[in-house]
């Protein structure tokens, strides 16, 4: 029972991370029908932005606090929001009317560019994120406990996802996003500045990816310029699993993948632990065989 509770806590924390990144994938797909494969690399840039911000501000491990972690988180989110705007303006907007294959190749190219740029600028050697939170543990049941990084991940993920939900469903910007996602051309005719809405959607998704990068670094401090490859792929799987284009589905898919991965780590034999990453792919294949649109996805008619 202790193992189950501990892995449940770990899975919810990891699932929150995947959900934050998956939201960026699903929002961009919703407004452009584009898979932004560079999104995982924006997550990587967010981690480095937070790392250098902490060093610049002198946030050493001697005086960790939630305030310092929040400052680093906000700076990284702002930085990656600007990066998201730049990617949309320079890479995706010029080819918006091109074929889907062109957009797909461009997305892969942007991803490779950011990965190699990261290795060139930051170096290929791993770095270690400073300890910004007090190292405390709170017993839950027996040996099972929750740590301050876990609390930060769970609370921040919940607040950010709730804030996104309110933004999408309770504001004029959210109505515009939903209108663009439903029909881009009709939204233009209704007077919506679609370029602005799409750009802000990229910025918002990139900011969420940066938040995920900082939250992961608080729990797993070792990182390098290629951390976005595997994590980004799993988050994409989460988005597809929940139903690509569906915000609630992205959250659900992220939690399912996070729980499945940690439960596999806790209950699979030690010899099979190196293959725990395959669990996400196995779940995806199983669900898509039964429901190709994902758990909460719907089939949209093709416009001709």
Image: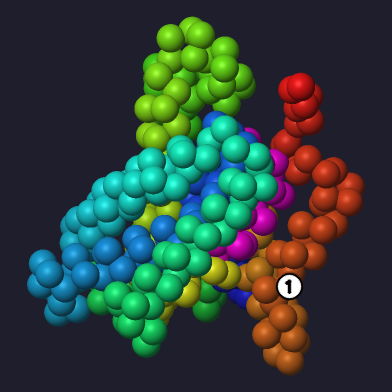
Residue 96 drawn at (x, y percent): 53, 36
Predominant SS of the magenta segment: helix
Residue 118 drawn at (x, y percent): 37, 72
Identify the residue at horizontal 57%, vertical 70% (top origin): 230
Identify the residue at horizontal 82%, vertical 58% (top origin): 285
Question: Is 30 drawn above or below residue 67 in the view shown?
Answer: above
Residue 39 drawn at (x, y percent): 49, 55
Q: Residue furthest top?
A: 190
Foreground residue among 60 and 28: 28
Quarter containing the C terminus: top right
Identify the residue at horizontal 34%, vertical 46% (top origin): 86
Identify the residue at horizontal 42%, vertical 43% (top origin): 88
Question: Is 179 drawn above or below residue 46 in the view shown?
Answer: above
Q: Residue furthest bottom?
A: 271
38 to the left or right of 243: left
Please say whether residue 225 is visible from this viewpoint.
Answer: yes
Q: Which residue is mark 1?
A: 278
Quarter containing the N terminus: bottom right
Q: Is 244 colored magenta in this rendering?
A: yes
Which quarter of the figure has residue 229? bottom right
Secondary structure at badge 1 equals helix
Q: Which residues are magenta?
A: 231-247
Foreground residue among 35 and 233: 35
């Amino acid at each position: 029972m202790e193992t189950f509770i501990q892995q449940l806590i770990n899975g919810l924390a990891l699932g929150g991370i995947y959900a934050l990144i998956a939201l960026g994938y699903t929002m961009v797909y919703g407004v452009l029908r584009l898979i932004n494969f560079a999104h995982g690399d924006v997550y990587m840039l967010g981690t480095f932005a937070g790392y250098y911000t902490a060093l610049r501000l002198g946030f050493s491990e001697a005086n960790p606090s939630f305030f310092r972690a929040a400052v680093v988180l906000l700076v990284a989110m702002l930085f990656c929001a600007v990066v998201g705007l730049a990617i949309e303006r320079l890479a995706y907007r010029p080819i918006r009317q091109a074929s889907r294959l062109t957009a797909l190749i461009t997305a892969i190219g942007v991803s490779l560019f950011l990965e190699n740029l990261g290795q060139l600028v930051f170096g290929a050697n791993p770095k270690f994120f400073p300890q910004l939170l007090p190292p405390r543990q709170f017993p839950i049941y027996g040996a099972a406990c929750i740590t301050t990084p876990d609390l930060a991940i769970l609370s921040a993920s919940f607040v950010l996802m709730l804030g996104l939900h309110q933004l999408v469903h309770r504001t004029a910007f959210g109505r515009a996003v939903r209108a663009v996602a439903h029909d881009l051309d009709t939204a233009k005719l209704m007077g919506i500045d679609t370029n602005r809405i799409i750009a802000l959607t990229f910025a918002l998704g990139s900011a969420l990816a940066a938040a995920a990068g900082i939250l992961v670094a608080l729990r797993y401090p070792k990182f390098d310029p290629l951390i976005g490859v595997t994590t980004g792929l799993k988050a994409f799987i989460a988005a597809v699993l929940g139903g690509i284009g569906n915000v609630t589905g992205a959250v659900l898919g992220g939690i399912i993948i996070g729980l499945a991965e940690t439960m596999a780590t806790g209950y699979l034999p030690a010899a099979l632990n190196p293959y725990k990453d395959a669990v996400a792919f196995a779940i995806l294949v199983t669900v898509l065989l039964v429901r190709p649109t994902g758990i909460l996805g719907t089939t949209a008619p093709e416009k001709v």
